[in-house]
Image: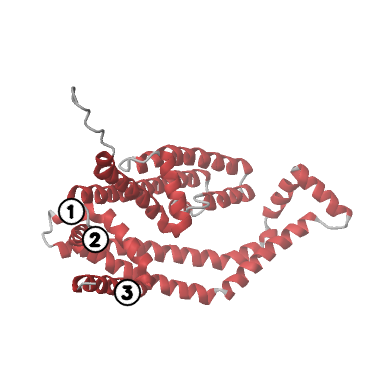
Amino acid sequence: MDRERIIALFFFGLLALITYQLYGVIEPFLPSIAWAILLAFMAHPALAGLNRYIKSRSTCALVIAIGVALGVILPAVWLSAQLVREAQGLYTTLSHVSAGDSVDRAVAWIRGTSLGARLDTMLTSHGIRLEDQVHKIAVSAAQLTSDYTVKHGSAVASNIVGFIFHFAIALTTFYYLLRDGESYYAGLQQLTPLHEADKIAVFDTLRLTLSSVMRGLMLTSLLDGITLGLGYLVLGVPYWGLLALLSAAAGLLPIGGTAVVFIPAAIYLGLTSSWMSATILLVWAMIVLAIIDNVIKPLAMGHGTGMPTVVLFFALAGGLEAYGPLGIFIGPAVVAVFSALLRVYRREYVREEGASPTPPTEGT
């Protein structure tokens, strides 16, 4: 074995070892870094626009980072205060629910169904009142909620501290990616051992895919919050603004989605107002979500990626299964890069190997 081969083997072995150790160093921060990269993709057009007025790129990046921080921190503080007030009144409300007519309405509704009527008859035959059972269930739910809050209070506090720490990491990374991200992007392109045209094809495909997915998710999430918030407002759901914000955030969830917000709101309307209002809210939510999820979202996400709708669906579903919430972006990115590499392979190899032989000339 000659000296150059030994040097090459040593170099790549050392590179693999150090890369593995580097992964161990940054692995706890990978989710924060990934979110920072995605935010930088989203904010890059704003950076370019602001840079036309403010010539310092560092100042532009700082302004946008501060804006993002305030956009997250201020709503989070307001939402936390709202949730604390709601949690404080939850036990009292449920404990005294029998003082109003909510239990009576719930019991009347249960008795109005065929299954509920049979259940009421069976309980009465054993000397048990349905009203007492509903009241006990409400008080038990309040007690469980209170006990859970006390038991997991320290864990919640720890999670809040962890969130603040990782948010600070993500925000710092976001600032430096905005300021120097283009040089990082160009450096990564230079390190990729492909022809220049192939590099452009792969990296442009990745950029367009991430931009399209983020644009589609943000647009549909915003529409979810606006349309459902309008329904909450018209039908008289309390804290409709808070619920609209929660609906927009829930629109990003891979499982449940906005249903985790509007279904409890509909149940609340049925118990406190009328079941007609609850039905109207459910019908409104199903109609607007069917339009948003089945028409607007595929159009918004598919535009720019070039993926068929079914491929985009499996990319999103598979990414969520494999990577969690970040899979919403990683799944389509993997599929898009794979598709770009297949195009490179077809252009560079298939045509050459599959070229038809030159037909023989006459007389040979």
Give the labeled residue for mark 1.
Answer: 48
Q: How is the image coloured?
A: secondary structure
83 or 158, which is in the foreground? 158
The residues tagged by marks 3 and 2 sit, at their Cα atoms, a distance apart of 37 Å
Instruction: Answer few, some or many: residues within 10 Å of disc 1's Cα (few below 14, many 20 plus, some between 14 and 19).
Output: some
Dot 1 amino acid type: Ala
Dot 3 amino acid type: Leu
- Residue 356 spot, x, y in % from top left: 26, 33
Q: Is residue 258 above or below residue 171?
A: above
Dot 2 amino acid type: Ile
Give the labeled residue for mark 3.
Answer: 17
**Mark closest to the chain's N terminus, 2 or 1:** 1
Q: For residue 137, say whether it is visible.
A: yes
Of circles 3 and 2, which is in front?
A: 3
Give the labeled residue for mark 2.
Answer: 64
Which quarter of the rendering shows the C terminus?
top left
239 or 253, which is in the foreground? 253
The residues tagged by marks 2 and 1 sit, at their Cα atoms, a distance apart of 11 Å
Instruction: Answer few, some or many: residues within 10 Å of disc 2's Cα (few below 14, many 20 plus, some between 14 and 19).
Output: many
Instruction: Answer few, some or many: residues within 10 Å of disc 3's Cα (few below 14, many 20 plus, some between 14 and 19).
Output: few
Point out which mark residue 23 bears.
none
Of circles 2 and 1, which is in front?
A: 1
Of circles 3 and 1, which is in front?
A: 3
Q: Secondary structure at mark 3?
A: helix
